[in-house]
Amino acid sequence: MSLEYYRNLITSRFRDVNKVLMICSGKGGVGKTFVSTCLSQALRDRGLSVGLLDLDIHGFTTHRLLGLRNPPKILEEEHPVMVKGLFYLSPVVLVEERALPLRGLYKEKAVIDLLACVKWPRLDYLVIDMPPGFGDEVTIPMRYLRHKSCAVIVATRDALSLSVVSRLIEVLRSEKLRVAGVIFNFSNIFKLDLSLDVDVVGEIPLIECVERALSEGDSPYERCIEVREVFSKLAERIIHRAEC
Ligand SMILES: Nc1ncnc2c1ncn2[C@@H]1O[C@H](COP(=O)(O)OP(=O)(O)OP(=O)(O)O)[C@@H](O)[C@H]1O
Ligand SMILES: [Mg+2]
C-alpha cells in the first residue's frame, strides 16, 4: 500500500477527534505513561469524551496504570474497546502481554497499523502515550496527525533529562508540532532551575501511593486522592493550553 493510501486512511480514522494530545519526552522513565493515563481519566471526569492510545510497541503499560487486571481483547474489528469510560487501544488488546520484538521497517509498519486500525468515535481528546526517544515511532504519528495535535512534554528537573528535552523541543519544532507545555514530574526530588523554551503546565511530586496501587493491580488515579487532585488541576490547564 502507498503512503498516500495510509495518509488518507489515518485521516479518516481520526476525522471525529477534536484534539490529539501527544505525551512525549526524549527520555525514558520520566512518567509519560503515568501522565497519559491519569490525564485521560481526569479529562473523562470533567465530562469530556476521551480516548487513550498506547503507541509504545515494546513497553506498553497503560493497561496497568488503568488497573485492568484482564485487559479486554478487541471484539469488533475497527473499533477501539471501551474501558472505564475511555475509548482505548493498546497492543495489549491485540496481542495480550506478548513481546513484540519488532525492528526497523517492521516497527514503523506496526506504528502505522496501530494508527490506522480503528475508527475513533467523536472525541474531545485523544491522548497518545508515546514511546521514549524521538525515533520513527515518535515522528511518524507526529507527521500523520500534526494538524490536530499538541505535544505535552513530560520531564524531570535534572541535568540529563533537561538536556534531552531541549533536543526533543528542537525535533518538535522541526516537525512543526505545537507544544502545550512541559509537566515536571518528581518535582519534590529533582529541582534544577534551568529554563526551557516552553511554558510550564504544572508539576507533580513523587506520590508514594502510586507504586502501592500498581503493585496490587490497582489504578493509582482511582486509589490515590493526591493523584486525582494533581491531575484535576493539570487537566484544566491542558484544556486551556491545548487550544494552541
Ligand atoms: N509522580 C509520580 N509518583 C509516583 N510514581 C510515579 C510518578 N510518576 C511516575 N511514577 C512511576 O514511575 C515509573 C515510571 O513512570 P512511567 O512508566 O510513566 O514512565 P515513562 O516515561 O512512560 O517510561 P518509558 O519511557 O519506559 O515509557 C512507573 O512505575 C510510574 O508509576
Ligand atoms: Mg511509558
Image (spheres, rainbow, N blue to C red):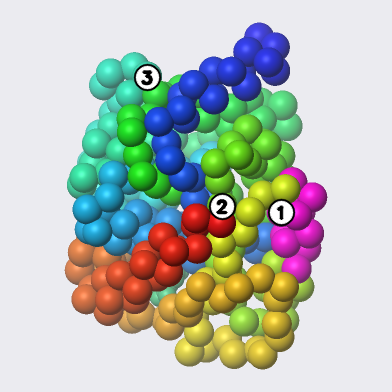
The residue lying at 54 percent from left, 18 percent from top is 9
Which residue is the site of mark 2?
150
Disc 3 element: loop
The residue lying at 60 percent from left, 39 percent from top is 147
Tell which of 223 and 70 is nearer to you: 223
Q: Disc 2 marks which amino acid? A: Cys
Q: Mark 3 or mark 2: name the one nearer the start of the chain.
A: 3
Q: Disc 3 marks which amino acid? A: Glu
Let me know if residue 195 appears in the view. Answer: yes
Q: Which residues are magenta?
A: 166-175
The residue lying at 67 percent from left, 60 percent from top is 26
Which residue is the site of mark 1?
172
Relative placement, left or right, of 15 versus 219 is right
The residue lying at 22 percent from left, 58 percent from top is 45
Q: Disc 1 marks which amino acid? A: Leu
Disc 1 element: helix
The quadrant of the image that shows the N terminus is top right
Above or below for 50 versus 93? below
Disc 2 element: strand
The image position of residue 74, as x and y in percent, is 31, 26
Distance from disc 2 to disc 1, alpha carbons, whole Å, reads: 10 Å
Which residue is the site of mark 3?
78
Tag 1 near tag 3, CB within 8 Å: no
Asked if the stretch drawn in magenta spans residue 242, the answer is: no
Camera-near label (1 vs 3) is 1
Q: Mark 1 or mark 3: name the one nearer the start of the chain.
A: 3
Q: Mark 2 or mark 1: name the one nearer the start of the chain.
A: 2
Can you name the residue that lies furthest to the top here? 1
Tell which of 124 and 89 is nearer to you: 124
Q: Residues within 10 Å of mark 3 (few under 14, many from 20)?
A: few
